[in-house]
Amino acid sequence: MITAAPETEASAALRTMYVHKIRRLPIVDALGTLVGMVTQRTLYEHGKAATPVRELMTPTPYTIASGVPIVEAAAKMRTLGFGALPVVDGGRLVGIITESDIFEAFLELLGARRDGTRLVVPVSEVAAGVRGVLDALARAKAPLTGLATYTDRRGPSVVVTADERDPRDVIRALHDAGFEPSDVRVRRAAGV
């Protein structure tokens, strides 16, 4: 975990951020207790080279506990308008969660890191729809790599990603189960 002490000069903090390719730097005391946060932007806009970060940091920043589910962290970040939150356990800094971490979790949840077929399947009710779609995938022997649900103005949908490059058997199994996919995409993994 990359941190700085309160007496660290702004120029040294910026150098640390540049070297480690980070935009936010937790400030901790000698015991490892989080005492503040400073951003690259704040250092650029308000810091003079020799200014200690304690004069520029946000003291007692908003934090999140280490056991909090990622969806709650994402909601808190969105509500507060923050791109990151320090993660604490018993008052001690144990990490930092960033927007990039949320995006990574989202990609993993949807199976976007693997080749395959992504299908959006409208359903009338979420729980029964998930069961029916999963049963259809099992009948088609299509290995599931991602699963999510959402509801928009048209109603609920199940989004599945299967380890299939030819979606015809999956689509046929969904049709046989009474489902009509609204979107089918065969794709290479994200980030490839």
Image (cartoon, rainbow, N blue to C red):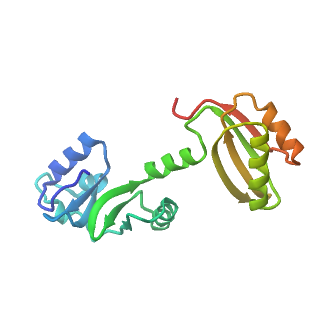
Residue 12 percent coordinates (x, y):
15, 48
- Is residue 54 visible in the rendered structure shown here? yes
Asked which quadrant contains residue 169, the reply is: top right
Asked which quadrant contains residue 88, the reply is: bottom left
Q: Does 101 sit left or right of 24 as displayed?
A: right
- Is residue 153 visible in the rendered structure shown here? no
Along the viewing direction, whichever of 37 and 71 lies nearer the viewer? 71
Q: Does 181 sit left or right of 90 as displayed?
A: right
User: What residue sits 78% from the left and 56% below the top?
Assistant: 129
User: What residue sits 76% from the left and 32% below the top?
Assistant: 167
Residue 18 percent coordinates (x, y):
25, 42
Along the viewing direction, whichever of 66 and 50 lies nearer the viewer? 66
Image: 59 above or below 84: below
Image: 41 above or below 186: below
Residue 2 percent coordinates (x, y):
24, 50
- State the count of labels: 0
Along the viewing direction, whichever of 141 and 123 lies nearer the viewer? 141
Residue 84 percent coordinates (x, y):
39, 58
Q: Does 9 sit left or right of 190 as displayed?
A: left
